[in-house]
Image (tube, rainbow, N blue to C red):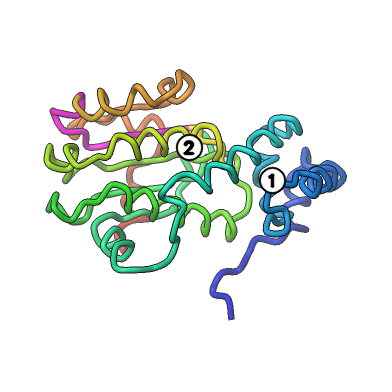
Amino acid sequence: MSLITCASVEKEYEKLNNVKQDDIRNLMAWLKGAAHLPHEYITELDVILAYHSCACDADLTKRVIDVNYTLKTLFPFYQNRKVDACLDMALQTWLIHPLPTLTKNGFRSIYCELLDADPKKFVYADVIKAFLMIMDLWQYEEGTVPGVALIVNLDRVSLGHISRVNLTVAQQFFYFLQEAMFVSLKEFHFINAPTFVDKLLSMVKPFMKDELLDILKVHQADANSLDEFIAVEDLVKDNKNV
C-alpha cells in the first residue's frame, strides 16, 4: 500500500482556471509521439505540474519535459534513487522540509538547514539527491502551488563544508533547477549567512542565470531583512517540532 497520497487531478483542474483539460490532453498526445521519452511513466499530474510551472506555454512545456527526462538519464543524482545508508546520512545531516508557511507574496516555503556540523559527514551529491527526492514527493502530494520560496539556513555551515561542494554536481543541479524542474522558483534566500558567504557565492554564481541571481537574497545573522519576505515568527513556529 502506498504511503503517498497523490494530489487529485480533478482538484487541480478546479483550482487552476488557466489550465484546461484539453491543453493537457494535447500534451499527453504529444508525449506518446515522442519516442525518446518514457511517456508510459509520465502521469497527467506530471504534465499539469510542468504546464503550470511554464505559465501554461505549451511549447515551453514540451521543451522543459524533454530536458527534464533527458537529464534524469544523465545526472548522477537521479541514479539509484533508493533509501540506502548514503541517503539516510544525508537526511540525518540536513533538514529538507516543505513548510505550510507562505511568504508574504503567497509562495510556499522549502526550508533547508544543516543539522550536523561535522563536515566529514557532508556529501554534497547525496544531499542534492535527497532534496530532489523530497521535492518530487512533496509535489505529488501537494500538486501545483503559486510559486516556491527556497530558504537555506547557513547557520552551521563552515569553510569545511564549502570545500566539500562538488562543483560538477553543483553545476548540474543549478542547470536542472533552472531549466528542467517542474517548479516556479520565485524566491531564494540564504539566511544566517556567515562572514565567508562570499566564498560560497563565488563558487555557485557562475552556474546561476540572471533570473535566479535577481531573486537570490543573502541575509546576515544579525539582520532583519528576511522580515520583508516572510514572517519570521511563522517560520520558527513551523520548524519547532520538526
* In the displayed structure image, the side of residue 161 where residue 215 appears, left or right: right
Question: Could you say which is closer to the camera, residue 87 or residue 7?
Answer: 87
Question: Could you say which is closer to the camera, residue 69 or residue 159?
Answer: 69
Quarter of the image for residue 9 reads: bottom right
* Image x and y of residue 18, in percent: 77, 38
**Label disc, if present, on residue 177 of the rendered structure:** 2
Element class at badge 1: loop
Vertical relation: 117 (above or below) 181: below
* In the displayed structure image, the side of residue 136 where residue 92 appears, left or right: left
Mark 1 near mark 2, Cβ–Cβ under 8 Å? no
How far is disc 1 from disc 2 in space, using C-alphas?
22 Å
* Image x and y of residue 196, in percent: 14, 28
**Label disc, if present, on residue 78 of the rendered structure:** none
- Tell me which numbered mark, 1 or 2, is placed earlier along the sequence: 1
Element class at badge 2: helix
**Label disc, if present, on residue 36 of the rendered structure:** 1
Q: State the residue at coordinates (87%, 45%).
A: 22
Question: Could you say which is closer to the camera, residue 21 or residue 209?
Answer: 209
Camera-near label (1 vs 2) is 1
**Is residue 190 a member of the stretch shown in magenta?**
yes
* Image x and y of residue 92, in percent: 26, 62
* Image x and y of residue 87, in percent: 33, 62
The magenta segment is 187-198
**Is residue 123 a member of the stretch shown in magenta?**
no
The amino acid type of the residue labelled 1 equals His
Quarter of the image for residue 206 reads: top left
* In the displayed structure image, the side of residue 65 where residue 219 appears, left or right: left
Q: Residues within 10 Å of mark 1 (few under 14, many from 20)?
A: few
Vertical relation: 41 (above or below) 152: below
